[in-house]
Amino acid sequence: MDFTIVLLIALAIGIILGFIFERGQFCMTLILTESVFFKNHRRMVGLISAILICTVLFNIAVFLGAVDSFNLLRQVGVNPNFFKPPLVVERSLIGGLIFGFGMILAGGCVAGILFRIGEGQLSSAIALLGLIAGFATAVVLEAIGVVGPERGLYPSGVLLPEILQIPQGFLVALVAALLLVLLLALRRRAGWKVFSAILVIFLLGAATLHYSTRPEIVTPTPPPVQLTGEQIEVARFVNAFHVTVSNRSVSKIIPFFAEDAVMVLPDGTLIKGIDMIKSYYEEEFTQYRQYILSGKASKIELVDNRATAIYSSGLRVWALGATLPPYIPYREVFTLIRIDDKWKIETLVVTPRGAE
Amino acid sequence: MVSAFLIAVVNLLSFVLIAPYAPSATAGVAFLLPMQFLLRDLSGLGPVLYSYLSGATWKVLLISGMWGLGAIVGSLASALISGNFKPRRPRGIDAARSLLGGFLMGLGVSITHGCNFLHVLGGTPLLVPASILASITIVVGAYICLKLMRYLV
């Protein structure tokens, strides 16, 4: 797929939407201003209807496989999950509030300022310049390290149904029902009281989600059935290690290692001792936005208080941006020692698979 | 209501073919495009700027730029047809307010990885948790600002 075609399609979609924006004067600032100041919810009803229609149509498109069949992003090497940002509660809260303030001060949301530029309003062009300056400032702050890379509670592309363990169809129906209630409330001019109550319910739900225990994203690989009792114990230990690494929790990774543990990385780098291992993982998790490690046992041997486990593992890491995350196959050789009835990693040798 | 329906349908088309409509990174293209031309060797840049200026992220910024450019062209066409096109200069104070508002929006876009359109009409319908939360906080932020303005003015 030629990337130019994707750009032309994007341009065509932009032109159609620009036309509709101007005709319908679609702007969230205008919608909110009319609702809050003048108690006129006509445009708000339109916005909520658009969200409702999108909710239903998008999910039908996903369900029917239309997105998998026709989406062009993967063909040009772009990760579609880039448009489903990871959940970083602080970022959503602070960024959203800043954006909301800005939207009112600028006199238009992003769609609003774009269509008003088309109408010849210089103030919207100035707002666009501000938008560029704000974006540039954030990028520079990130580049010089003032704003660190975010650590998402969940990776990009993880949706609410997966987090809440609720079937997608049920949740979509629930959201659609909620939006319908909201529409009816606005039609009956119940107004901001109902709207605020629903917002509070959502915020409480979000807060509960944030402060509840973080669920494991990577499902541990079940140990092969032919393993004996002690081998299963070792396999569970290694699987738990993989899950903990995937959850990027350095404090939880460290207890897996013995004090004088040694790690050998695929490039031959030797890491000795618990402190260096801690630094290594801290550095790794700072570099990468997502880090998913999983593996399958190829061989597990036990002799007295020691065990050797050989794993065929795979790592998916990606740092910044929209690149499709590559799968990097590794071979991991664990030497474990039982200390106080608990397994600890004594050595971990990681080699690229195929290079061993 | 007709506009809302049409926006939803075109947004669906955008989602199926590319991604939900998200024109905010137009700002990113405008900022980074000169760097793309001026810098011959990108490898000397730090990882953040390098990731913005190369590969897939740069492609996303260009797509978003096309969405934004298209919106300006489309609205210009509509305004010319309907006779709504009229160049208007703001007063100094309004221009400053627009600049500050735009700046805050730019920061917000970068922090939440998207504008109101992506979060409200793209991420929320897909049940992306970050977008649902961002949509709510955008509305709350706007509401507080409106109330403050009403109180102050």
Image (cartoon, rainbow, N blue to C red):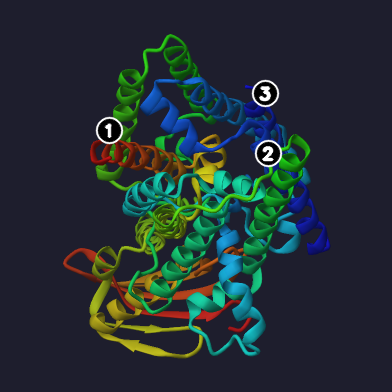
Residue at the spot of label 1: A204
Q: Nearer the viewer, mark 3 or mark 2?
A: 2
> Real-space Cα distance between discs 2 and 1?
44 Å
Q: Is residue A30 above or below residue B17?
A: above
Image point (63%, 90%), residue name: B41
Image point (58%, 35%), residue name: A26
Mark 3: few, some, or many residues within 10 Å (few <14, many ≥20)? few
Residue B12 is marked as: none
Image point (53%, 74%), residue name: A331
Asked if residue A68 shows in the view, the reply is no
Letter of the chain that mark 1 sits on in the rendering: A
Residue A61 horizontal/vertical position (percent): 69, 34
Q: Is residue A217 above or below residue A320?
A: above
> Real-space Cα distance between discs 3 and 1?
34 Å
- Report helix, strand or loop for mark 2: loop
Residue A43 horizontal/vertical position (percent): 53, 25
The answer to which quarter of the image holds residue B26 is bottom right
